[in-house]
Amino acid sequence: MRAELEKIIGAAALDERAVRDLWPLTIMAERAGSPSPRVLVARPSGRDQVVEILRWASAHGVIVTPLGGGSGVCGALGPQVGELVIDMGAFDRVLEVDETNLTCTCEAGVNGLALEERLNGLGLTLGHFPSSLPGTTVGGLCATRSSGQESTRYGSIEDMVMGLAVVLPDGTYAAPRPGPRSAVGPALHELWLGSEGALGVMLGAVLRVHRLPESVVGRGYGFADLGSGLEAMRSIMQAGIRPLVMRLYDPADAAFNGYDLPIGACLLVVATAGRDRVAASEADVVKSIASSATELGEEPWQRWQRHRFDLSAQRLKSLLEPPSSYVDTIELAASWTALPDLYVRVWTAISDGGLALCHFSHAYEQGCCAYFSFAGSRETEDEARSAYSRAWEGTMTAALELGATISHHHGTGQARARWVADEMGGWMSVWKSVRRAIDPAGIMNPRALGGAR
């Protein structure tokens, strides 16, 4: 295999190493003495090389997984011996920033933080801020159907992607479609958003960007209980306001973040943005809606800004270093009416003898994301894995029974593989048909979207 690939991209662009994402279960296995396998990694430098690699792989039945930043947390990136990884790190150019039409054309390997910093230098923003931003790539953000901390204002990745350049498994190239919107058939590029490398290789994207707001007004509010905080979030969204950030921390998460609130109280951090008068006026509306809460001033907002990237995937990895420990995050989303029951059931499932935290964010008029963090330790590695698995089992069961989605923005991979079909229902057969049609040789990432084919 290596000799044939050397003819396509050269020996210097091939190496052999262990490749994985940051799925805690894999990290726990490595800690217990089961390292990830070494696999062949190809680093193409242009479209023609990607085309030739995929044609070769299809002809020889070699499994292929694209690699972005490797910052996923669900095990979608977990190649095995005999498989091939395509490292897209050489596709790292920002090809154009159109300051008039507010678009950005870039390659799939462009780092998320580097892109944001370049846009900021022009007075622009993509508005996409996952906590793992420094370790992400544009292709990875698309492949996992990512969402970020400012999604309430700017939307998630699907709202930013105008078009994708992709190479199908048979080597066919598809370029981005023109214009801000098209009614020429379905927007088929959206099939790649959340596909986790199952449909081919993304080369680049055309993205919507935004002008940086003239002003941002951020404040914190202390609510007596979770119910009143969630009701305030719902009222703010349904009043037509699009906050830059809005996050409600349950009592445990508020205390974990250093806030001294009364027992049972929750913290709401909310910021409005735009022209000076718009940001100030919307902040006044938020204040009136939160009139039953204790206003905490600007400090909670400023503190959140300082620590917004602290709970990154790399940080979670470091928390798994002690033997027999476990830690993870699970992000669900549900309607406003389902959220209180979902919170109680999931908190019960994840809090068995360990730390359990939750905050609510990524709000919509119809509901929001509930982001749970949990951690603990046991006497042995087997007991730690069992506790970890029970937390996931209880959480997924609660989500499905209450009509919540089992993932708001982390994707599925191996972590959620067992429950993907339960959520998708009849759409699972549609997905399988699409996948078989685009990848008849079955070479693309078998760990994507539950591994369904």
Image: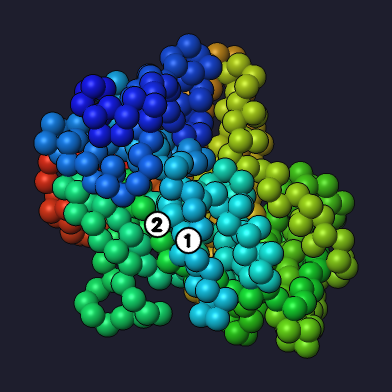
The type of residue carrying mark 1 is: Leu
In front: 244, or 94? 94
Q: Is residue 257 left or right of residue 172?
A: right
| Numbered marks: total | 2
Q: Which residue is mark 2?
A: 204
Spatial CA span between label 2 and label 1: 10 Å
Quadrant of the rendering where the C terminus is positioned:
top left
Label 1 element class: strand
Marks 2 and 1 in Cβ contact (< 8 Å): yes
Using a 10 Å C-alpha cutoff, classify the residue at mark 2 as few (fewer than 14 neighbours), some (14 to 19) or many (20 or more).
many
- Tell me where residue 321 appears, x and y as whole percent: 62, 22
Q: Which residue is mark 1?
A: 95
In the displayed orientation, state which residue is furthest to the top: 33
Q: Nearer the viewer, mark 2 or mark 1?
A: 1
Residue 397 visible, this orientation: no
Quadrant of the rendering where the N terminus is positioned:
top left
Q: Is residue 193 left or right of residue 54?
A: right
The type of residue carrying mark 2 is: Gly
- Tell me where residue 87 appears, x and y as whole percent: 40, 37
Q: Is residue 373 left or right of residue 161?
A: right
- Tell me where residue 338 appears, x and y as whole percent: 49, 64
Q: Residue at x 33, y 67 (%)?
A: 176
Q: Is residue 42 left or right of residue 130?
A: left
Q: Residue at x 23, y 22 (%)?
A: 3
Residue 453 drawn above or below residue 16: below
Corner quadrant of residue 206: bottom left
Q: Residue at x 29, y 64 (%)?
A: 175
Q: Which mark is residue 401?
A: none
In front: 392, or 143? 143
